[in-house]
Structures are given as C-alpha cells and as structure tokens.
Image: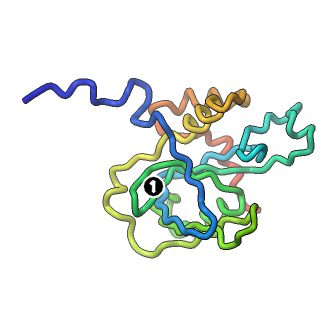
Amino acid sequence: MGSWEGWDPPEGTQGWSDWHWWKIPTGKVVQLVVLSRKPLGYSGHFHRGRMCPCYGEGCQLCREGIGAQLRYIVGAAELVSRRVGMWDMGRSVALELRQLAVDRDSVRGLMVAAGHYSRARQSRTEIERVDGEPPGWIRELESPDICRALVETWRKAGFEIPDGMEAAEQRSIGKNRVSAKVSDSLQGP
C-alpha cells in the first residue's frame, strides 16, 4: 500500500486553517447544531459592515460614539450541508440559546433553527429549538478553536488584538478551549 504522507493538516492548525462564519440570511432559516460546550464572549463594535474589537479605555470607536456590544461565538455545523463554522450572535440570542439548553449540561449538541423574520436591515436573529436527537455524525466532530478563529480573523482584517485575547489564543491552541474570563458575561440580563 502506498504512503499517505502529506495529507495531515499543517502543524498548529488542528485541521482548521480557514474559518467559515455563519451569516443568517434574511428570509431563510438555517438549522445548526452547536459544537461548542460554551461560548466565547467579547466586546465589539459593528463598524463598516463587520464586527471589530473594542479596545476598552481609549478605544477610537468608543470615542466616535459607536456603541460597543457584547457578542458571543460558538462553533456550529449546518445540519443539511454538515459544514462547520463559527456563529457570532448578540447577547439576547446567546441568552436564548442558553435558555434552550437549560435541561442540558452544555449547549453542545443543541439543534436550533435560526432566521431573520423581518426584512429590516438590522433585524434580530430569531432562534428556536429543533426537536430530536443530534445526528450521529456530530459525535466525532470537535468544535473549531473559536478563540484562535476570532484572533486570526481580526489579524487578517488588520485589527490589533485586544489585551488578553492574544494570551487566551496561545493557551487555546490545540486544546479547543476558550477564555473563561470573557464567557462569564452570560450570567443573565
């Protein structure tokens, strides 16, 4: 039998080198199964069509009056295509997600239908639980390294990485874990 060298993912990527970010399209429903045990939370600004980091004290976007918002990211796979990616959501959707999983020990394996039911430009994402057991193929899937994906996405866009995120990213490499510090903000409204 021939050699299969060279087919492994590049060192340090843990199989993920290009991250898909789920965008929930207006007028469509996307069925996702959550792969993360808990979310990665961060503070960011919606500016020029994308989320960018808030740098806290002295942040230029804060000084310009562009409000910061709490955001949460989980790894998720689309149930039909089985494509894996990251799902970035606002605090209210994250709290709903947590509530849908109240009878579980984590959000991993939770299946949800997500959609925008209004055509308004900034319409809110609506979610509801999809009944049933998660498909067997997700048991073997690990969540992408969310912290690393966020840091690399911001780097690629030319943003400086906020204090603490770089260290959290270094700790998470190869361990598929996130900084607990930023996820603690999901303690209710």
Disc count in the image? 1
Number of other residues with Cα within 10 Å of mark 1, as a class: few under 14, some 14 to 19, many 20 or more:
many
Residue 54 at x, y percent in the picture: 78, 38
Image colouring:
rainbow
Q: Quadrant of the N terminus?
A: top left
Horizontal side of 188 relative to 59 (left or right) equals left
Q: Give me the residue at 53% from left, 72% from top.
A: 129
* Residue placed under numbered mark 1 in the picture: 77
Q: Give me the residue at 65% from left, 68% from top.
A: 116
Front one among 187 and 27: 27
Q: Toward which corner of the image does residue 180 lie, by quadrant?
A: top right
Front one among 2 and 145: 2
Q: Give me the residue at 86% from left, 38% from top.
A: 61
Q: In which quarter of the image is the C terminus?
A: bottom right
Horizontal side of 116 relative to 103 (left or right) equals right
Residue 179 at x, y percent in the picture: 61, 39
Q: Give me the residue at 50% from left, 60% from top.
A: 105
Q: Is residue 63 above or below residue 100?
A: above
Q: Is residue 131 above or below residue 143?
A: below
- Give the amino acid at mark 1: Ala
Residue 150 at x, y percent in the picture: 60, 38
Horizontal side of 188 relative to 101 (left or right) equals right
